[in-house]
């Protein structure tokens, strides 16, 4: 019996140390999460867009609206798949102050973009980025689809890589429109 007593004490000490380490990890994760939740959102870059119709507008001119800037390409399967959801989202929230700008990637030929937008009757703004300047200004976007949700004050409140979860996406838009 005397041999097991030190072993039990050691085992107990190891379990206590493991519990303490787990508590510290949880506390650090909670603190980091709180910091990110409370950290101010990044300001959307001051960018000038040129639509497929030749109109120009800026991120500044969109202030006061909740805006989704969606980087996409006609050759991107996920982009094409998500576009009907983007159209429905736009139609649902545009009357409440929601705007969308679909920015075609620099490698996407303008005539493909124009044909896509016309054939699918895209109701939102579609912009060209032939030199990749807009993509570079938004965190140097290279993957599509990548979207940035911007609040009424011009701050990026959410970045989406890939197709967003529709329920969460709509809830985030509704929260931004309400504020």
Image: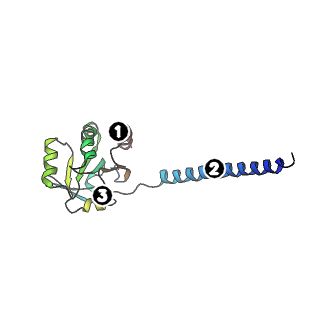
Q: Could you tell me which secondary element the residue under label 3 belongs to?
A: loop
Name which residue lies at 28% across and 43% down.
Answer: 97
| Colour scheme of the rendered structure | rainbow
As drawn, which residue projects farthest toward the right?
Answer: 2
Query: In terms of sequence position, does the residue under pointer 1 or pointer 3 come before the other?
Result: 3
SS assignment at label 1: helix
Find residue 78 and report its image quarter. Answer: top left
Q: Which residue in the protein does label 1 denote?
A: 166
Q: Residues within 10 Å of mark 2 (few under 14, many from 20)?
A: few
Under circle 2, the secondary element is: helix
The N terminus - image quarter: top right
Q: Closest to the observer: 14 or 117?
A: 14
Q: CA distance from mark 1 to mark 2?
A: 35 Å
Q: Can residue 114 be seen?
A: yes
Q: Residue at x 23, y 56 (%)?
A: 105
Mark 2 lies on residue: 22
Real-space Cα distance between discs 2 and 3? Answer: 38 Å
Q: How many other residues sit within 10 Å of disc 1, few (<14), some (14-19) or many (≥20)?
A: few
Q: Is residue 99 visible?
A: no
Give left or right: position of 156 versus 51: right
The residue lying at 19 percent from left, 42 percent from top is: 123
Disc 3 designates what residue? 142
């Amino acid at each position: 019996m005397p041999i097991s007593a030190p072993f039990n004490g050691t085992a107990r000490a190891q379990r206590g140390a493991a519990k303490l380490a787990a508590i510290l990890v949880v506390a650090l994760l909670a603190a980091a999460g709180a910091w990110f939740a409370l950290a101010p959102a990044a300001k959307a870059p001051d960018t000038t867009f040129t639509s497929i119709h030749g109109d120009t507008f800026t991120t500044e001119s969109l202030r006061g609206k909740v805006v989704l800037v969606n980087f996409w390409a006609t050759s991107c399967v996920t982009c094409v798949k998500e576009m009907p959801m983007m159209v429905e989202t736009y139609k649902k929230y545009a009357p409440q102050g929601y705007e969308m700008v679909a920015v075609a990637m620099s490698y996407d030929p303008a005539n493909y973009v124009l044909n896509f937008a016309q054939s699918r009757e895209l109701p939102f703004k579609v912009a060209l980025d032939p030199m990749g300047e807009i993509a570079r200004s938004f965190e140097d976007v290279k993957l599509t689809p990548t979207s940035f949700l911007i609040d009424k004050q011009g701050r990026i409140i959410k970045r989406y890589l890939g197709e967003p979860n529709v329920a969460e996406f709509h809830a985030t838009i509704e929260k931004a429109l309400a504020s």
